[in-house]
Each structure stands twice: as C-alpha cells, then as structure tokens.
Image (cartoon, rainbow, N blue to C red):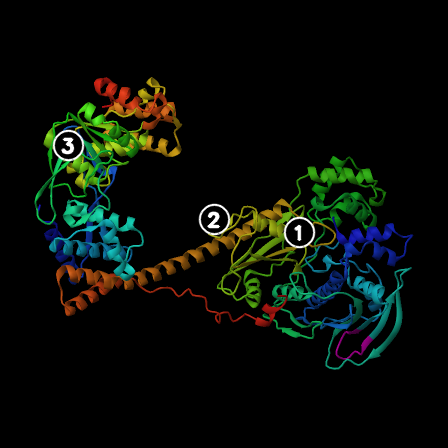
C-alpha cells in the first residue's frame, strides 16, 4: 500500500537515531507544513478533519468552531472546538502529544483521517515555531467534568510532556473537544486559502455547521443544509490485488495467524480456502509456514502468485456516496447558477480498492462568463486545494470533449464558460500522486469513472442549453413577427391602394395568421431569487 | 404576357385576399441555379425547368416577405410613373424602410432577381436597371440611338472614338445598327481590347470589337445578341485559357446562366464561337502559365458535373479534363511572350483562319 502514514512510520522508524523534532523538520513537506502559509492551513485542516470524523463515528451532527486570531506579526492563535464524543482523560496526552499515535495503519475505511498525519503534527509545528504548549479541553458527557491539559511533545523521545492537568468547568457543553494552538503562519485569501478550505468543507459536508472567525475579525456562520448524516461505513480488509511487498511484509510480521494459509484467509478480503491454496501452490510455499518466517523473496513470490490468480473483486458496500442530490444542494449553497446537474457512479475497483466517483455541475447565472471553468476536487469529503493540474479529477474533465456538449474548449484543456464542476472520489483508500496528498493519482479505472461521470453531466448540460436556445429562438421569432408585420401590411396596402381602416384590419389579420399556434414559451430566464439554498455569505468566502 | 405592373397587382390582390381569409400566403419563385436549367443545341440557351422555391409567410420569412413586397411596390411605382432606378438606387430607397431595409446591396439584387423570375420578366421591365453599362465597343459599326428628350435619331459611328470607345447603355432594346463588318470579336479583358483598338485591328479585319470586362453584364449580352440577330454575322469570343474564361464568360455569353435563367432566352448569344486560348494553344504556343488553384479545380469539377452545356459538348469536357491534367492556366496577355503585337499579327489571324483550332 502506498500509504502516507505507513510511509511516515517507516521514516520515523528508520530515523531512530535522530530526534523526533529533527524527523519533523526533515519531513515537513511530506506532512503539509512546507511554509508559513501552508502550515496554518494544514493545522486547520488536521483539526477540522479530525473533528468531522469524530462526530461521524459518534453519530453526532457536527457543530464546529474555527477561530484564527492574529496575535502579532506572523503569530496566530488557532482555536478549534467540536461537539464530538470527547476524549477520555488517559488518551488526551497521547493523541495530542505523540506523533503518529493511533495512526489508522492498515485500516481500509472510507474516512477523512487517512489524509493527514494527525493533529499531533499541528501541535509539534506550533511548539517548534512558538514554543507554546497546546491547550486542550475535552468533555465526554453532560455529567462529567471537562479535562484541561497543557502539553508539549518531548522532541527527543516522542512522548507527551504534561505541563498542566486539571478539571474545569465547561458550561453549556455536553461533550466535545477544544484545542488552542499558537503558531507562526501566514494568512492570505484566494484559491488555496483557509477561507476556501472552510467554504469547500461546508459545501461537501452539508450536514455540518461551521462557525468561522478569520484573522480579519470577520465571523461567518455556515449553517447545515441537511439533518441527514452520512451513512456509517465499515472497514474492509485489504484485497490481495492492492498490496505491495513492503505492506505485505509488515502485515505478515503483525498477523495473529499462525500459518501462511491462515494469514491469507484471515487478513485479506475475498480469499477463501481454494484461493489461498491456489496462491500458495503458485508461490511454491508450504501452507503451514509461519508468516513471520516469510523472507522478502517469499513475499515477492506471494505477490506474483496473487497477480496470477483470479480473485473475486472486493465488496463495494464499504463506500457511501454523498449522493447526487446532497452534492447538488452543497453546490447550490455556494453558487447561484441557472442550471445544476449531478451524478453518482456505481462503485468500481482500482488495484483491489473499491472507489466511487460522483460529480456535480453548475452553469450560468452569477458565474463568470469568461475564462476556464472552475473545478472543485474532493477526496472522502476533504477539499483538495493544491496541485489541481496533477489531479485525475482535472485530467478527466480535460480529456472529455466538451464541444460535444456545445461548450467551447481547447483540446486537452478545461472547458470554457460560466461553469463550476465538482468531483468527489470516495474510497477505502484514496490513491494520491504524492505523500503531500494533494492530487488523485491517474489510475485508468479512476480516470474512466471521472470521465463517465463528467460526460453524464455534459449530456444534461447540453440538453439544457438546447432547450434554452430553442426558447431564445422562439422569442426571437416572435420579435421578428412583431417587427415585420407593419412592413408587410404597409407594402400590401400600397400595392392594393387600401385606406387606413382596411390597413388596420390587414395588420390584425396578419397578427392572427402569424401568431396563432405558437403556444406557450418555457420561462428559462435566470431568476437570482429562485435558489433557496444559496448562501451569499458562503459564496463570498475565499473570493 | 402582360405588363409587369399588372402581374404585380394580380399577385398583391391574391396575397391580400389570402391573408384577410386567414389562409396561407405564398411567394413562388423558380429555382435560379444550374440544377434548374436544361440545354439543347436546338434552343441554344439554358432553358428554365420547373423547380419552384416556395416562400410561405411565417415567422422565418416575415422579413424577406416584407422586403419582397416593398420592392414590388417600388417597381409598380416606377412602371406607373415611367421612371427607372438603378439597382444601387433601389438599395438606397430601402434605407427608408426601417427594420425592413437591406444591409447589403447583394440582398436587394437577389430579391430583385427573384421578382423577375417570379413574373418571367427582365429587370428593365420592372423599372430597374443595372448600375453600370454593358461593355465597350469600337470598330465598323454605327449605332442608331435617339435623344432621350427629343426622340431625335442619333447616329454613333464606332470608328470615330480614336483610342476610346462607345459605351453600351443599360437599356439596348431601342437601338438600331448599321454595319458592313464581317464579324464581332468579344474580348474578355479591357487591356486586350485596347491593344486591338489602338492598332486598328478592327480596320484590318473589318470587324467590331466588344470589351466584356469579365463576365458580360446583361446589357452587353443583350447588345451583342441584338447585333448578331440583326446583322447576321458571326460572334467570336476571345478569353483567357482558364475555367473562368470558359465557363463563366464564354458559356454565360453563349447560353446564359443558371441564376438568371428566366431571361436567358433573350440575353444569350447562341451564335457565339470560342476562339480564345485553348489547352492545345498553351502547348502549341508554349505559353507562360499559372498553376491551377483550388478555385479553378472546383470550377472544373462543377462544370463537369453540373453544367448542362458542358454535359452536351464532349469537346468542352475534354478541354476541361485536359486543363485539369495539365494543372495550369494561361491568360490572354501571355501571348506577349512572343512580342507585344504577336496577338494581332499572328495569333488572331491564324485562329480566325483555322476553324479546327476553335473549341466548339
């Protein structure tokens, strides 16, 4: 598995001789803390992703507060608060004060968490840039007192260092967690800003309420659009087709199974007695061999045998789409357009990993006429702000021939026109092009699904544009009739030497003759007030 | 056929009645294109066939309908007041019609042609005349015209213009001719006409020179036709050796065009014979050439597939194919390779003496 967290673990393990602080410094580009601007954004992202995941696991509708205060110069205070289940006292120091603690290694599940290294990295970043400890408050129930911690990470041992620990009052809060971090950062607006990240998060999570205070002191309430929570999904075991040598080696070391045969059947999905036997025969390995005694060559033989064996595709009920309708609602919240379309594809599989593509489109209305269309990309409900050009979602849009749908496009580039396209990939394991997790990798299966989804939107758009054109034509014809009837009447009156009364009669008859049977015209004009979902506050953000 | 204004009145009445009865109102025009003409050596001109273009009054045709009726109304007024308007003037009159005005003269010219075809009359019968006259004449001819105000006969001697020439008016129906010339030579370019005129070619050969200035205008075609009918002398046509010279100029002069098929009968010169540059000439005289361009190739293939005159004449099919294979064309002026006056001293006299070198 090309797995960011496992990669980080490997890195961490391979650098035992250096301190954890040094490890962080050396790998900050992998962890999303490359520079001041990205550092602040990544800290927000880790916190918000965590909060949303926590709320979903506890089946709570998320109420999240994000505050960024400018303390001085490039020093910011970040405050994140959620209404999640809260964290038990003993776990708090480890979750916030130990890098890579409880990473979701080997868990194949549709969740946000796989996309970051965890909130402890934000704590580390804060500590390294300002020297200030993280302040955490958490409460697990209405009758429990809230626990307050001030803690740092020991940069030599990667263990939490508790500076303060006490109970405190947290009135009007049943459960939830609050974290305060002081860190060096930089706040800017635009396509890759925190504003944009929060805005897109609200679009893709219409069940969440987010209160956001930006460093300029502007507060926005992004109210939830639906009470419906995303369905709970199950974790699945890895499918043999998707496992690489390093990952399988690690699985073999950690398994509870006592034989290779058992290991294959227990630790992988879709491997039964017959399949396990067939794989082991091809790999020329004994059934009863102990997994931890597998050499690197044995594992390689196993992987090769797997590729030669017919194995049923993994189950796909472990992915839950957001749903075409909800997706469209999200888009309506941010864009006051005249036409919307959405589609959810059936689950598909790349390298043994189930995934699903959904897409949504907005056209016209208040969208910019000029320039290339805007693309919003999401992976497991997390906005992707960087590396747009390298992403499979963008590629799929570029590879679609939009001229088929009456939208102009230079070959191989994004289509032109007043259009925003949203693409969401849901998967138990989202493949990214790099450890930075900013762009979806170009697997042929994924590109194909993106294209199919986008093409379906294109067809809907085309039929709308055709309808609109027809109406335009009809209105033009009616104007035409109105314009030319007097001329026809006048010329015919001249030719027949009619008096004024007769000319008036002639004009009326011409009207009857030309205007009868023209029927009703569909009202297709853009009505800026027709979109009930539209949230101007949200739309303004990030602009 | 009655007067054009009677025809216009009749149609106007029919349209009015139909509209007042809330019935369909239609304008029917013969299709004006090569696809709707036929050619037979017996007739000697492109004869209009039966395809009709129907324009029913609807939202889509309202503007054209209005413009056609306006133009008919103008025509009626011109006929009744015995006035005339050039095509350009008619176009400018339309500028008073607000939204129904023409934005390009091509539009009004086209509808004017439609109205002509509708009533099977020529432009002059509708009170409209061409913007320019129909070519220049020099040589052994006296044109008998009349003073427009007094009606007094005027004799115009075409030998008396020196290095200039007589200019054909747009209406030639009233003209009379006196001549002892042996033939008429119709020339494609003004330049060649002037060379022949300057060197008194008409005196040497006892002939009449006409400059067509490219595709001959209607007046030029009608003038040549009336001249050849009245005097009964041959008409020779001298053009470039290219598809334009063959098809657009010679063929139009001889048998008419698809576009104005409704008037071809009187606006063509069946007696015309081609003595211009043939594909064989290009080789015989080793003439400087230009390569055929796409537009030339297209003219050739259109001529071979759509032109009823070419269809009936194998010699012309061969000439077009020959040109196509050679891939080149040659202009009249290219004869100057052998000396500026080679055309007077050798080419034309040789041509005129050797009927086998013509294309028929």
Q: Which residue is mark 2?
A: A404
Q: Is residue A168 above or below residue A376?
A: below
Instruction: Tell whether B183 sits left or right of A212.
Output: left
Nearer to us of marks 1 and 3 is: 3
Residue A95: x %, y % from top left: 81, 65
Distance CA(mark 2)–CA(mark 1): 26 Å
Residue B18: x %, y % from top left: 15, 58
* Magenta extent: A137-147
- Label 3: element kind: loop
Q: Which residue is mark 1?
A: A440
Instruction: Tell whether A527 sits left or right of B303.
Output: right
Q: Which chain's residue wears label 1?
A: A
Q: Residues within 10 Å of mark 1 (few under 14, many from 20)?
A: many
- Label 1: element kind: loop
Residue B14: tell me if it is visible: yes
Q: Nearer the viewer, residue B241 or B43?
A: B241
Q: Is residue B331 above or below residue A10?
A: above
Residue A190: x %, y % from top left: 65, 63
Question: What numbered label is drawn on residue B57?
Answer: none
Query: Is B21 a magenta residue?
Result: no
Q: Do the dots labelled 2 and 3 sit on one chain?
A: no
Do callouts 2 and 3 mark residues in contact (Cβ within 8 Å)? no
Q: Do the dots labelled 2 and 1 sit on one chain?
A: yes
Q: Quadrant of residue B36?
A: top left
Q: Which residue is mark 3?
A: B141
Q: Which chain's residue wears label 3?
A: B
Distance CA(mark 1)–CA(mark 3): 89 Å
């Amino acid at each position: 598995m090309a797995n960011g967290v496992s990669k980080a673990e490997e890195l961490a393990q391979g650098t035992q001789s250096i301190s954890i602080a040094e490890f962080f410094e050396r790998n900050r580009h992998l962890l999303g803390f490359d520079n001041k601007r990205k550092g602040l954004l990544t800290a927000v992202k880790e916190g918000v992703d965590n909060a949303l995941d926590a709320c979903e696991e506890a089946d709570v509708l998320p109420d999240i507060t994000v505050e960024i205060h400018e303390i001085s110069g490039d020093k910011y205070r970040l405050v994140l608060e959620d209404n999640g289940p809260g964290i038990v006292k003993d776990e708090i120091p480890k979750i916030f004060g130990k890098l890579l603690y409880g990473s979701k290694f080997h868990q194949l599940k549709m969740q946000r968490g796989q996309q970051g290294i965890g909130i402890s990295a934000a704590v580390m970043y804060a500590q390294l840039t300002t020297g200030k400890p993280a302040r955490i408050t958490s409460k697990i129930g209405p009758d429990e007192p809230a626990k307050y911690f001030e803690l740092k990470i020991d940069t030599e041992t990667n263990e939490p260092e508790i500076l303060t620990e006490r109970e405190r009052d947290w009135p009007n809060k049943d459960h939830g967690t609050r974290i305060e971090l002081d860190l060096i950062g930089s706040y800017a607006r635009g396509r890759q800003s925190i504003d944009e990240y929060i805005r897109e998060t609200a679009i893709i999570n219409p069940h969440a309420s987010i209160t956001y205070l930006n460093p300029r002191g502007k507060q926005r309430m992004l109210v939830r659009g639906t009470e419906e929570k995303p369905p709970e999904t199950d974790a699945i075991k890895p499918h043999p087709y998707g496992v690489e040598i390093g990952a399988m080696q690690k699985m073999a070391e950690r398994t509870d199974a006592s034989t290779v045969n058992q290991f294959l059947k227990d630790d992988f999905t879709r491997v039964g007695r017959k399949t396990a036997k067939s794989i082991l025969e091809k790999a020329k390995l004994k059934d009863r061999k102990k997994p931890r005694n597998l050499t690197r060559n044995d594992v390689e033989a196993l992987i090769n045998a797997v590729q030669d064996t017919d194995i049923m595709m993994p189950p796909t009920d472990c992915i839950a789409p957001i749903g075409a309708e909800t997706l469209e609602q999200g888009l309506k919240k941010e864009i006051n357009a005249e036409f919307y379309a959405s589609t959810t594809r059936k689950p598909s599989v790349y390298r043994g990993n189930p995934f699903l593509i959904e897409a949504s489109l907005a056209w016209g209305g208040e969208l910019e006429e000029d320039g290339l269309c805007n693309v919003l990309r999401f992976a497991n409900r997390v906005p992707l702000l960087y590396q747009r050009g390298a992403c499979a979602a963008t590629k799929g849009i570029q590879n679609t021939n939009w001229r088929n749908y009456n939208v102009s496009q230079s070959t191989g580039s994004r289509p032109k026109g007043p259009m925003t396209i949203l693409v969401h990939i849901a998967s138990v394991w989202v493949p990214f092009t790099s450890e930075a997790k900013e762009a979806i990798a170009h697997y042929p299966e994924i590109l194909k699904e993106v294209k199919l989804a986008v093409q379906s939107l294109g067809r809907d758009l085309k039929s709308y544009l055709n309808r609109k054109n027809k109406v335009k034509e009809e209105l033009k014809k009616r104007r035409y009739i109105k314009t030319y009837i007097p001329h026809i009447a006048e010329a015919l009156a001249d030719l027949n030497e009619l008096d004024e009364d007769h000319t008036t009669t002639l004009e009326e008859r011409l009207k009857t003759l030309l205007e009868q049977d023209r029927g009703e015209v569909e009202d297709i004009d853009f009505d800026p007030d027709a979109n009930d979902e539209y949230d101007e506050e949200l739309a303004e953000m990030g602009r | 056929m009655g007067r054009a204004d009677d025809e216009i009145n009749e149609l106007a009445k029919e349209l009015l009645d139909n509209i007042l009865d809330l019935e369909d109102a239609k304008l029917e025009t013969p299709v004006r294109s090569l696809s709707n003409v036929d050619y037979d050596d017996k007739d000697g001109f492109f004869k209009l066939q039966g395809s009709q273009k129907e324009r029913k009054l609807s939202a889509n045709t309202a503007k054209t309908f209005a413009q056609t009726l306006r133009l008919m109304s103008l025509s009626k007024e011109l006929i009744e007041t015995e006035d005339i308007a050039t095509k350009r003037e008619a176009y400018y009159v339309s500028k008073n019609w607000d939204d129904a005005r023409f934005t390009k003269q091509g539009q009004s010219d086209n509808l004017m042609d439609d109205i002509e075809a509708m009533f099977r009359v020529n432009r002059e019968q509708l009170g409209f005349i061409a913007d320019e006259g129909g070519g220049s004449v020099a040589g052994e001819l006296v044109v008998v015209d009349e003073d427009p105000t007094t009606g007094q006969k005027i004799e115009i001697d075409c030998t008396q213009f020196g290095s200039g020439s007589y200019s054909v008016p747009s209406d030639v129906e009233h003209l009379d001719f006196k001549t002892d010339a042996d033939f008429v030579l119709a020339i494609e370019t003004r330049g060649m006409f002037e060379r022949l005129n300057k060197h008194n070619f008409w005196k040497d050969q006892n002939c009449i020179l006409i400059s067509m200035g490219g595709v001959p205008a209607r007046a030029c075609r009608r003038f040549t036709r009336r001249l050849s009918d009245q005097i009964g002398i041959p008409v020779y046509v001298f053009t470039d050796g290219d598809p334009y010279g063959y098809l657009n100029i010679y063929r139009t002069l001889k048998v008419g065009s698809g576009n104005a098929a409704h008037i071809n009968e009187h606006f063509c010169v069946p007696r015309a014979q081609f003595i211009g540059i043939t594909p064989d000439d290009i080789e015989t005289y080793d003439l400087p050439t230009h390569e055929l361009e796409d537009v030339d190739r297209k003219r050739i293939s259109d001529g071979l597939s759509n032109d009823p005159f070419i269809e009936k004449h194998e010699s012309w099919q061969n000439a077009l194919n020959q040109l196509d294979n050679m891939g080149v064309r040659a202009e009249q002026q290219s004869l100057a390779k052998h000396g500026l006056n080679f055309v007077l001293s050798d080419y034309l006299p040789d041509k005129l003496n050797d009927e086998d070198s013509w294309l028929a």
